[in-house]
Image (cartoon, rainbow, N blue to C red):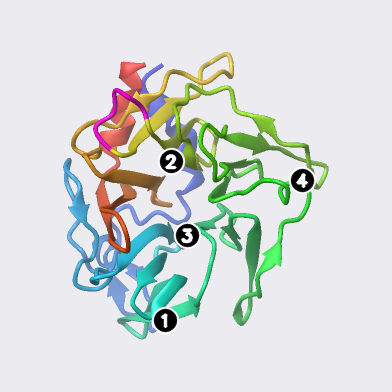
């Protein structure tokens, strides 16, 4: 199957929110291009670049990025200095300006569900209403017995998540008749430390970070594509352009399918967010 055919459902899913290089209107009616939506940054090429270093980057740790479906709000966690407990920070387009605010002084790792109205935070979540995000709510059973770091969801509601322990598996739980089933272990080619899964909205691939003897460094990013028989293909390392001697982690594809985001941690309270053209990821399918 060709890559373009394989990813067609993913592309169709986001047609309503994708920019497709056409102008969109901000809240005050000013037309902005797709590139300007990404904090006014020039789009990256085939090699990763720091994302919005003049807006997001500080001397502290910026990591765990999540993007709203309209591409106008960027959420991430910051730690260091006065940000002692992984503060949840947002940079949002307001009245033609990018405005930063602290959503919560302490937060789990964010992920915006494909419906755009749910922000998952590990074992907790928030829902969006007319006035903004709700207070934090617990997911409850069957998730509350797992030490979840990152939980992501497909368009059909199936959740994929990790656990904060060495050799811990990645798991998934399907939403059946409005209720989540008991989580099952994902039959995936994993290594020593498996964390931060990102599931494609159509469940055609999964990205996670892992520690392996044949990796490039502390942790590397991997991808596995779903096969025609519904099994998962081999784990494919994202390569030395993305993976380094440092901890490369928390991968995700932007809602419009154009860019791959991740963060690189240098230890302690220091990490930066990077992005790269998503073709670098899509082109890996032929390696399986």
Residue 215, horizontal then vertical, whole percent: 29, 28
Q: What residue sits right under mark 1 in the picture?
A: 101
For marks 3 and 2, the one nearer the N-term is: 2
Q: Is residue 100 above or below residue 273?
A: below
For marks 4 and 2, the one nearer the N-term is: 2
Q: Quadrant of the C terminus?
A: top left
Q: Are marks 4 and 3 in contact (CB under 8 Å)?
A: no
Quadrant housing residue 273: bottom left
- Label 2 neighbourhood size at 10 Å, few (<14), some (14-19), many (20+)? some
Q: Nearer the viewer, mark 4 or mark 3?
A: 4
Quadrant housing residue 32: bottom left
Residue 9, horizontal then vertical, whole percent: 49, 35
Residue 146, horizontal then vertical, whole percent: 67, 46
- SS under mark 2: helix
Residue 14, horizontal then vertical, whole percent: 47, 48
Q: Is residue 63 above or below residue 150?
A: below
Q: What residue sits right under mark 2 in the picture?
A: 11
Span of residues in magenta: 212-217
* Marks 1/3: CA–CA distance: 19 Å
* Marks 4/3: CA–CA distance: 27 Å
Q: Nearer the viewer, mark 2 or mark 1?
A: 1
Q: What residue sits right under mark 3 in the picture?
A: 69
Residue name at image x 48 percent, y 54 percent: 16
* Marks 4/1: CA–CA distance: 33 Å
- SS under mark 1: strand
Residue extending farthest top = 229
* Marks 3/2: CA–CA distance: 14 Å
Q: Nearer the viewer, residue 21 or 69?
A: 69
Residue name at image x 31 percent, y 44 percent: 248
Q: Which mark is residue 142?
A: 4
For marks 1 and 3, the one nearer the N-term is: 3
Position of 81 compared to 84: left or right? left
């Amino acid at each position: 199957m060709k890559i373009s055919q394989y990813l067609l459902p993913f592309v169709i899913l986001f047609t309503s929110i994708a920019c497709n290089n056409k102008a969109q209107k901000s809240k005050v009616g000013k037309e902005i291009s797709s590139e300007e939506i990404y904090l006014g940054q020039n789009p990256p090429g085939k090699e990763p670049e720091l994302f919005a270093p003049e807006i997001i980057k500080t001397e502290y740790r910026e990591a765990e990025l999540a993007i709203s479906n309209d591409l106008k709000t960027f959420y991430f966690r910051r730690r260091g200095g006065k940000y002692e407990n992984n503060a949840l920070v947002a940079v949002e387009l307001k009245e033609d300006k990018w405005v930063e605010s602290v959503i919560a002084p302490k937060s789990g790792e964010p992920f915006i569900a494909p419906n755009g109205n749910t922000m998952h935070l590990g074992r907790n979540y928030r829902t969006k209403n007319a006035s903004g995000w709700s207070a934090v709510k617990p997911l409850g059973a069957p998730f509350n017995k797992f030490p979840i770091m990152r939980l992501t969801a497909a368009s059909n509601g199936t959740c994929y998540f990790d656990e904060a322990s060495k050799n811990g598996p990645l798991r998934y739980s399907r939403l059946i008749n409005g209720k989540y089933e008991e989580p099952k272990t994902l039959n995936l080619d994993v290594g020593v430390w498996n964390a931060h899964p990102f599931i494609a909205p159509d469940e055609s691939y999964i990205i996670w970070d892992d520690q392996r003897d044949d990796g490039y460094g502390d942790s590397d990013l991997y991808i596995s594509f779903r096969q025609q028989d519904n099994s998962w293909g081999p784990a494919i390392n994202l390569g030395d352009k993305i993976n380094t001697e440092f901890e490369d982690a928390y991968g995700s594809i932007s809602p419009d399918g154009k860019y791959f985001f991740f963060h690189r941690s240098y230890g302690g309270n220091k990490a930066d967010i990077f992005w790269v053209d998503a073709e670098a990821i899509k082109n890996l399918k032929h390696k399986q």
